[in-house]
Structure formats: structure tokens, C-alpha cells
Amino acid sequence: NAGVTQTPKFQVLKTGQSMTLQCAQDMNHNSMYWYRQDPGMGLRLIYYSASEGTTDKGEVPNGYNVSRLNKREFSLRLESAAPSQTSVYFCASRSQVTSSYNEQFFGPGTRLTVL
Amino acid sequence: DAKTTQPNSMESNEEEPVHLPCNHSTISGTDYIHWYRQLPSQGPEYVIHGLTSNVNNRMASLAIAEDRKSSTLILHRATLRDAAVYYCILIRGDTGKLIFGQGTTLQVKP
């Protein structure tokens, strides 16, 4: 049981390049989330998927797209990377959509630098 | 989403109890109080949550004020491994969305 896995762990891009961050969970969770964390800050929600086939914007969605490929996988795409997107990206999953029990399980993060 | 206020940093000595405060004066009746922590270079991890009553689990205790406008996370015996950023977060039960503030950085001295 690997929990939440993210690939890659590190990535350096040039401005304007595109890339996709991959996330997978093996806990049969319904909901999945993408956050970014800038230095010295708390995490901010980019997009989330309450269930397979649905996605919604979070606090900071501009410059990103997401795909809920199936129940296990939720990818985050940067179409044209900008230096302001330099950050650590965390994926998380949660078992229930409507529940007071909100434990989210986080992956180890992807450290992205855009030059 | 309702806001929370936490001290930027706190210090503790190893083996001593730690009380981490959180103010949430605009909390609504359906908001649950959650605590997460983030160890260095790791993703956040769930610590504890509650609604009105005090809660205990293997990691910590959560004391909630009677008016629910504040809460305190209690680590009964701090260890060096408890050094982390602790986030107090209010969540409406049906959203699942975590809104992180800046949290409290806890330093534990040997």
C-alpha cells in the first residue's frame, strides 16, 4: 500500500515549456486534490476532484489544467510554465466527498523550478 | 471559509507538554476544527479534528472552548520528531477543501 505517489520528485523547466505532474493513489479514495506551497507559506488549493469524472477550481487555478484520468489518477498540467509557478506541488486524496471526517493523505511533493 | 489565527512560532523543551493555540472567532456551527502538521520536506499529515467536544487520539488532544471561538492542540510530551509547522483549519463538512494559513512553527529543544 503505497498511499499517494507523485512523479517526478524534481523538475526544472524553462519559461514557456509545458509539463504534466502525475499523482496516483491506491486507497480507493473518491476525492483528489492538487496544492502548491511557496517558500514560507501554507498550501494553496489549485484544483480538486470530488469524484471520478468531476473537477473544480480551487483558490489559485490560473495557469493550470487537471485531468481525473480514473479513480486512481489525477494529473496537473502546466501548458506554458512561468517563473511564478516555481513551487512545491502536493497531491492529496480523501475517502469521502460528504463527510465530517476530512483526513487527507498527502504525497511527498514535486519540487518545480521554472527558469 | 472562516479564518484562523495562530502564533507564528513556539518553542518547547523535549519531554514537556506543548499547547498550540488557535483563534477562530468567525467559526460557524457546521465548521469542524482540523489540525494538520508538516514535518520538514514532507507533505502535511492529519493530526486530529473535532466539532464541539474535546478529542483525544494517539498523537494529540484537542481542547475546544465552550463558545468554539478558540481551540488548543495539546502534545502531551514533545519529542524532537514533533518539530513541524502545525496548521489549524476550519472545514465545512461537505466541501473537503483545506484552506491553510501560515501555521505555527514548533521548535523542540533537547
Image: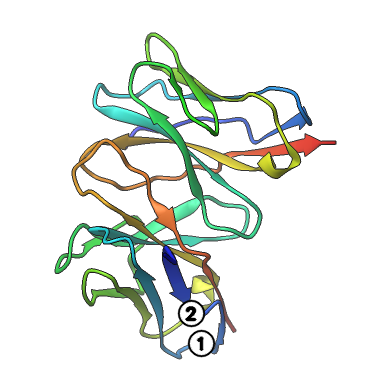
Q: Position of residue B70 (x, y in %)?
A: 46, 19
Q: Which mark is residue A82?
A: 2
Q: Position of residue A12 (x, y in %)?
A: 58, 85
Left or right placement of residue A69 versus residue A90 in this view: left
- In the picture as drawn, the residue positioned furthest to the left comes out as A53
Q: Earlier in the sequence, mark 2 or mark 1?
A: 1
Q: Which mark is residue A15?
A: 1
Residue at (34%, 60%) from the top-left corner? Answer: A33
Q: In the image shown, does B57 or A14 lie closer to the viewer?
A: B57
Left or right placement of residue B109 versus residue A112 in this view: right
Query: Chain for mark 1?
Result: A
Please name the colour scheme applied to the rendered image. rainbow
Report helix, strand or loop for mark 1: loop
Task: Indicate the amino acid at tag 1.
Answer: Thr
Residue at (23%, 48%) from the top-left corner? Answer: A96
Q: Is residue B32 above or below residue A104?
A: above
